[in-house]
Image (cartoon, rainbow, N blue to C red):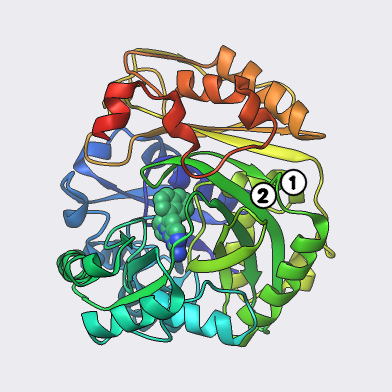
Amino acid sequence: MFRKILIANRGEIALRVICACKDLGIKTVAVYSEADRYSLHVRFADEAVCIGPAKSTRSYLNIPAVISAAEITNSDAVHPGYGFLSENAEFAEVCQLSGIRFIGPRPDAIRMMGFKQLAREAMKKAGIPVLPGSPGILKDAEEAVAIADRVGYPVMLKAAAGGGGRGMRVVYHRERLPDLFHQAQQEAAAAFSCPDMYLEKYLAGPRHIEFQILGDEDGNVEVLGERECTIQRRHQKLLEEAPSPSVSPQLRREIEERLRKAMAGVGYTNAGTVEFLMDERGELYFIEVNARVQVEHPVTEAITGVDIVKSQILIAAGAKLPDILPLPITLRGHAIECRINAEHPETFIPCPGRITGMNLPGGTGIRVDTAAYTDCVISPFYDSLVAKLVAHGKDRAEAIARMSRALEMLVVEGIYTSAPLHQKILADADFRAGRFNTHYVEKFLPDAVRNSG
Ligand code: MV4
């Protein structure tokens, strides 16, 4: 087992990893930027190393700085959290070459999942349903037109190295395709240093559903059910739940069975998330794999009783899934997460600043993951997540009731937060009935904002 783990992250996820390490009796090393000197991950880790200025490219994304911190502290392993270096195959490689265990998938698996078209081909070959589209990377705009004619419009052009919505274009008309192809290609080249594009049939107003995977180095893969992540705006998830109100036990069993084989087939290890889109008919189509622990992992922890971060650490240390998981995995009740962001309630523009006073809710069925405290500063340099409220209940109605109660008892003074929007969503009849798609949040926004956004 590891003696000491360096956490290459900040905020609530750094604290989350520290908690898992403390539970396992493992020493922790925090790294921090000059802006994070007074952050809780620095305070609660056993050791802390400053790795550079506030700008993340010079600190949390600075591979030599992170590796040096691991070396001078004699750390056995690095946990990357989410974001920053978590899906950087080169970083994972440098860790291994420096004799530091990277707590995540192997570099080649991270690389494959980063090339979305490669992942798509591999999943298709393994029997996972994908949307009709190009068989590989598009050679040029002419080939794109030929394939789009076959697939039928609308189609979506996607950057092979993309993700999070950048380098994507929806194409409704044949005549517009060459132009949009070149636009998307240029955006992709600028953003990811890779102009490769592929295309898929476009699904209008889908639901976004993702399955949680754990794999060990013996080739065992387990699926911990799915999360419903449809409630989002501009590719920022706002509220997630597990299980999805629109996945039947039969569909879950079917997808889980295929995913176990497919992910074992590509030799996937550690934690990962397989994302799907669901159409109006309730069919699921693979879109991409996230090779990291995700922000919304606590809803899966609530309904499975599995500590996902602890599992990541044990897997990286060589543990086998049958020895660390309560198999077979069973789902208990329903969980909801609300991401409380520092942002203006109407424009969704980040509103960093000092929190002058706060009360965090608790009580039966409530978990709060946060690194915020009274007098802390939500920095403009990083994401605007202030806290994750997680409610667990025997069913969806009880989880909703507990979340509403938690939101009422949440106080954050000195900054604006998204909490009022969450209250509106939880009170909405469509949300309560499970009637929503990816366009759902737009209806809560004032017309002026909706039109300009
Ligand atoms: C799509 C799609 C419709 N059809 N692919 C957005 C981010 C990236 N991970 C994939 N995304 C989408 N891919 C096809 N073929 C619609 C989206 C999409 C979306 C997906 C999930 C959640 C929110 C979304 C918001 C806009 C677009």
Q: Is residue 233 above or below residue 201?
A: above
Residue 95 sits in quarter: bottom left
The answer to whether 245 appears left or right of 121 in the picture is right
Label 1 lies in ligand 1 vicinity (Cβ under 8 Å): no
The residues bearing labels 1 and 2 have C-alpha atoms spaced at a distance of 5 Å
Residue 97 lies, in percent from the top left, at: 35, 83
Which amino acid type is shown beneath numbered disc 1? Ile
Residue 43 lies, in percent from the top left, at: 40, 37
Q: Does the image show residue 220? A: no
- Front-most of residues 31 and 277: 277
Q: Within 10 Å of the Cα at label 1, are there few (<14), some (14-19), or many (20+) other Cα atoms?
A: many
User: Tag 1's secondary structure?
Assistant: helix
Residue 214 sits in quarter: bottom right
Residue ID at (20%, 41%): 34
Disc 2 target residue = 300
Disc 1 target residue = 303
Residue ID at (61%, 74%): 129
Quadrant of the image containing the N terminus = bottom right
Quadrant of the image containing the C terminus = top left
- Mark 1 near mark 2, Cβ–Cβ under 8 Å? yes
Residue 429 lies, in percent from the top left, at: 65, 24
Residue 342 sits in quarter: top left
Q: Is residue 29 above or below residue 63?
A: above
Which amino acid type is shown beneath numbered disc 2? Thr
Q: Is residue 439 above or below residue 431?
A: below
Q: Does the image show residue 147? A: yes
Ligand 1 rendered quadrant: bottom left
